[in-house]
Image: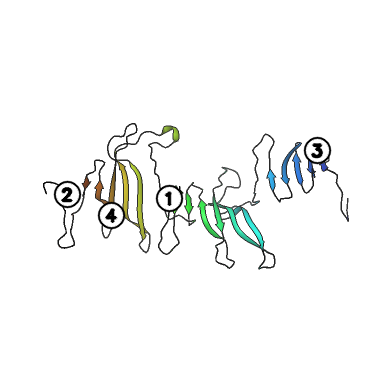
Amino acid sequence: GTFTGDVDIADKIIHTGDTNTAIRFPEADTITFETAGFEQVRIDNDVQMFVEANSKQAKLQLHREDTSVAADDVIGQITFTGRDSGGAGTQRVGAAISAIASNAWDTGQATGYSPAHLDFFTQNNSGVETTLIPRARITSGGSLLLGHTSSEHSDGYQLELSATNSTSSIALTAIQDNLYASQLSFVKARGSSLGARTIVQDGDILGQFAFYGADGTNRALGCTINVRVDGTPGDNDMPTRVDFATSNDGTQSVSNRLRLRSSGDVQIPNGNIVMQTAGKGIDFSATSDA
């Protein structure tokens, strides 16, 4: 039929031959969509959309209808927009979440290979309209990249942070009881899966800070701070040492220079203690037999 004016519906539009599928108007300023006699989607007067499911997993699917998905193709995107008064009500995009193919997909479903990253974008507070800036990425390999979306590491680190300020500094701040405290925890267990994890052993690295610099072609390792098991762990017992390692000129292979043992001893594995100021040295005056 052809309608040139409004069509008044008391409650629902029902699919012929499939009476448990309908578009309903159950109350004022509300539209719902039903399949199998169950409400699946609801849009209300607060411009809220509810996606439900009857004995199934509720989901909202963004689908790219393409026979050839290439690397860097956007598979789906959720954008957050609003209208600004300065632009006479022009719609602006403030943030977005995008799924981006990390490699070409097997859209023929021979293997079901479909790798993708998840990117998060925001617009900065510069006072002028700019394009969306990528702030974070969850890679197809499971790494979380903050401050950048392209990893220079081939090691597959679970977390990578990059700073864009002039000091290249990153602050980790925790606020508790009006006091500032920062804590970064490293937890190490042996084994590749949760059920197979066992106690760590002497010499295992519990955590590491690595310092790299750009050498003009690649990134080069300059220094590491390693925390290692320093003995045999036991129940509520984790002996540790801290190793400080630097690289010589002409190489990025680091060697231990300073070691703080679990016993409290300080060792110099490779090098000398050099006093560069006249009249300075090791002071034993704190002991009674100095």
Q: What amino acid is labelled 4 in the image?
A: Thr
Contact between marks 2 and 4 (CB within 8 A): the answer is no
Viewer-proximal residue among 81 and 202: 81
Mark 2 to mark 1: distance in Å? 35 Å
For discs 2 and 3, the disc positioned in front in the rendered view: 2
> Which residue bears the numbered disc 3?
18
Q: How many marks?
A: 4
- Residue 16 on image: x %, y %: 83, 40
Circle 1 sits in a helix, a strand or a loop, which is it? strand
Q: Which mark is residue 179?
A: 1
The residue at 36%/57% (across/down) is 212
For discs 3 and 1, the disc positioned in front in the rendered view: 1
The residue at 43%/50% (across/down) is 179
Q: Which mark is residue 286?
A: 2
Identify the image quadrant of residue 113: top right
Which of marks 4 and 2 precedes in the sequence? 4
The residue at 36%/45% (across/down) is 207
Which of marks 1 and 3 precedes in the sequence? 3
Q: What amino acid is labelled 3 in the image?
A: Asp
